[in-house]
Amino acid sequence: MEIKNQFLLSSEQVRSNCQNFIAQLPIDDDKPLVVDIKPRTRNLEQ
């Protein structure tokens, strides 16, 4: 199962959407999902 979504936290609405998305993800002990939080990279801004 490929679940990939990216949220750029720029407003309270985006934060709420992100929280709702994470809350709906399946929980699986055998194949856990990774939530990666990191600063935005410069590759698209250059």
Image (tube, rainbow, N blue to C red):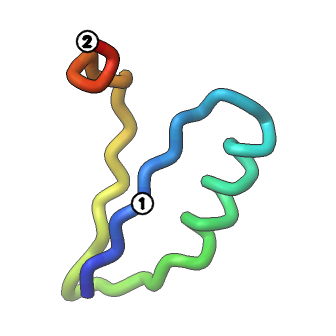
In the image, farthest residue toward the front: 46
User: Number of callouts in the render?
Assistant: 2
Labelled disc at residue 5: 1
**Residue 5: % across, % down:** 42, 60
Q: Is residue 37 left or right of residue 42?
A: right
Point 28% across, 84% down: residue: 29
Point 27% across, 22% down: residue: 41
Residue 21: image quadrant is bottom right
Q: Looking at the picture, which amino acid does disc 2 mark? A: Gln
Point 34% across, 86% down: residue: 28
Q: Which secondary structure, mark 2?
A: loop
- Compared with 2, 18 (above or below) is above
Residue identified by numbered label 2: 46
Residue 39: image quadrant is top left
Q: Which one is in front, 7 or 28?
A: 7
Point 61% across, 54% down: residue: 18
**Residue 35: % across, % down:** 36, 54
**Residue 31: % across, % down:** 21, 82
Q: Looking at the picture, which amino acid does disc 1 mark? A: Asn
